[in-house]
Image (tube, rainbow, N blue to C red):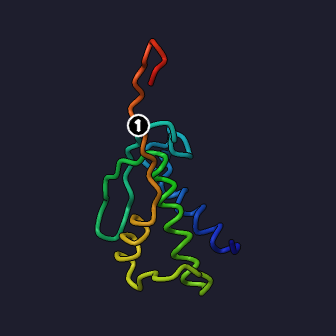
Amino acid sequence: MTDKMIVAGSNRLSELAPALKDPKKALLPEFGGALTFRLSRSDGATRLILDAASVNFEIALAVLEQAIEEGVAQAKGIPTSAGDRRKWAEEKRWVPEYLQYQYDPAGRK
C-alpha cells in the first residue's frame, strides 16, 4: 500500500459520510446496517443505499484506481475502463454463503 492509496481510500470513505447529508449525523457510515446518503457528482446527486460490505467495496475500488494510476497494481486482467474495472472487481468480490441451520433434537443430523 502506498501513501496515495491510503489517502484515496480515506477520501472515498469521507465521501460516504452521513454528515455530508445532515451535519448532525455521524462522520462514518453505520456499518451495522443499511445506510442511505447522496453523492454529489457533476451529473447531479445519486442516491445509494450501502451496507458495510458495499462501503468496503467502494473503498477498495478507490484504492485499486489509485494503484493503477501509480502503476503498482499487480493483478492480471485488470480492465482499462473504469466501468469495466467495477464489474471486474465485483466478479472478484467474495460473498459469504450461509447454509440454513436445521435443529435436530435427537442430534442425529
At mark 1, the secondary structure is: loop
Instruction: Judge left or right: residue 101 versus residue 1.
Output: left
Task: Tell me which residue sits at (44%, 68%) in the image.
Answer: 89
Q: Residues within 10 Å of mark 1 (few under 14, many from 20)?
A: few
The x, y position of residue 75, in whole percent, is 54, 79
Direction front: furthest residue: 108
| Residue depicted at 70% across the width and 72% down the height | 3
Q: Position of residue 59 (x, y in %)?
A: 53, 61
The x and y percentages for residue 26 are 54, 40
> Relative to residue 12, is residue 33 depicted above or below?
above
Q: Is residue 83 above or below residue 27?
A: below
Front residue of this view, candidates 94 and 45: 94
Q: Quadrant of the C terminus?
A: top left
Mark 1 sits on what residue?
99
Q: Residue at x 31, y 58 (%)?
A: 46
In the image, residue 59 sits, relative to residue 73, either above or below, namely above
Q: Quadrant of residue 83?
A: bottom left
The tally of labels here is 1
Give residue 57's position: percent from left, percent from top: 48, 59
